Image: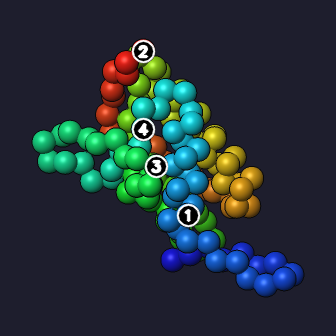
Amino acid sequence: MALELRTKYGQIDISNDVIAMIAGGAAVDCYGIVGMASKKQIKDGITEILRRENFTRGVIVRQEDDQVFIDMYIIVSYGTKISEVASNVQSKVKYTLDQTVGLSVDAVNIFVQGVRVTNP
């Protein structure tokens, strides 16, 4: 499924993978984010930090009727306030997608998959 935008010049189709890459890139720029996690945790509870080319494994873009929902799986830095980090990610992702793609996102759902101690 892809996002379809119509302009006076024609139609633009944007893949959900592209939207996921933009959302993941915006999220990892936020303070307190160590990285993106896979939406499918390994069975022993260890989560891997995804590289930039794999952000689509940690972001789900859902379209229902005329609404767009984004589910993000993140790993936060130890010692940060998780609710504030999640709120910042939600705001930044919504703003970035609106500015770059012109996409109005109805909800950005954050799933914290782990907490990591980062080296200073």
Q: Residue at x 40, y 47 (%)?
A: 51
Earlier residue among tags 2 and 4:
4
Q: Which amino acid type is marked by label 2? A: Pro
Q: In front: 50, or 46?
A: 50
Q: Is residue 5 above or below residue 19?
A: below
Given contact means CB atoms under 8 Å apart, are the residues at marks 1 and 2 in contact? no
The image position of residue 106, as x and y in percent, is: 62, 56
Please give the residue where the numbered disc 4 appears in the rendered image. Answer: 35
Q: Which residue is mark 2?
A: 120
Pick the front one: 26 or 80: 26
Mark 1 vs mark 2, foreground winner is 2
Disc sitting over residue 102 in the figure: none
Amino acid of disc 3: Arg
* Residue under label 3: 52
Q: CA distance from mark 2 to mark 3?
A: 22 Å
Mark 1–mark 2 distance (CA, rounded to whole Å): 32 Å
Q: Residues within 10 Å of mark 3 (few under 14, many from 20)?
A: few
Q: Which mark is residue 18?
A: 1
The span from disc 1 to disc 4 (Cα, nearest Å) is: 18 Å
Residue at 69% across, 46% down: 95
Label 4 amino acid?
Gly
- As drawn, 106 above or below 26: below
Residue at the location (20% across, 39% down)?
Answer: 46
Q: CA distance from mark 3 to mark 1?
A: 12 Å
Secondary structure of residue under mark 1: helix
| Quadrant of the image occupied by residue 78 | top left
- Residue 112 shows up from this direction: no
